[in-house]
Image (cartoon, grey):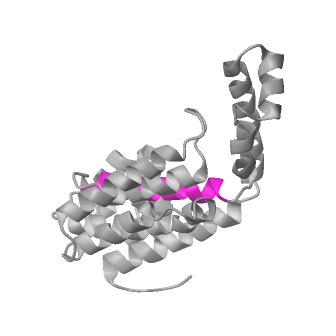
Amino acid sequence: MTVPTTTSLAHVMESSGKDNYLRLAKALGGVKRFGRETPIPILEVMARLGVWEAMDVLRRAEWPEINPARALAADLAGLSLKVYERFRPWCRAPLQAVEAAAAFAAGIAGKGTLAAVHKLAEAAAERCIIAEALRPPEHYAALAAVAASDPFGRPGEMVWSAWQNASMALDYGTTDVFLVAGQLLDKNSRIFGRLAHRFGDTDGALAFYHDAIREACFTELNRTELSRQAHDRATASILRMHLTGEVRHD
């Protein structure tokens, strides 16, 4: 199985923008000296620019095969499974989807199995939604599994979506604000009834709670930089393993 391992300054310009292109070019000694089309290891991009930029390069890379992308997506989605299990320990659909994606990539599971668990993971993600504009961490964790198990997913987008949704799950999962969100938005609760009466309608109460919870989340997320750094380190280790076969723990 083949994973894209190199990119070029021209591709970085296309995928990550002019600022990152110039930063990387400067680190490499300049465009004229290094060359716009000279191969650059993706791990070098990660070392110079960061995990996000390396993932964006992989998102836009030419993948000769889909199974390496699915195997990588399964590992990246697996980072957020504990978030899902924390909030919904009774549901195994996302775990089964990630396991099936890895098994399919290894040639063990069939496409029928993959499609079946993919649908179950999609349903699990939908059941997590509290309100249209309020999606808790377990929803994103389930979406990461959905991305990895998509039978018709495009390689780069599959990897990117699994990683992005896992990142969001881990970010939101560091706060307990969402633990009370379901109670706050329960239309049968006394608190919700009081707010609905105060605002005169259900939509007004929903909007009020949504804004309050979002503000609380972002206040809390300012304290979770260490969690993000830990996720970046885990992502970096997974990328090294898939791109080089090296297993390293930072």
Residue at left offset 22%, top offset 51%: 152
Q: Is residue 19 above or below residue 208?
A: below
Q: Position of residue 92 (x, y in %)?
A: 46, 65
Q: Is residue 17 above or below residue 142?
A: above
Q: Is residue 164 above or below residue 67?
A: above
Left or right of 86 in this view: 212:
right
Q: Judge whether residue 215 can be spotted in this image.
A: yes
The N terminus - image quarter: bottom left
Name the quadrant containing residue 181. top right
Q: Is residue 138 above or below residue 209?
A: below
The C terminus - image quarter: bottom right
| Residue extending furthest toward the left | 64
Q: Position of residue 69 (x, y in %)?
A: 28, 64
| Residue extending furthest toward the front | 188
Residue at left offset 21%, top offset 57%: 62
Magenta residues span 155-173
Q: Position of residue 131 (x, y in %)?
A: 59, 34
Determine if the magenta segment contains residue 158: yes
Left or right of 117 in this view: 78:
right
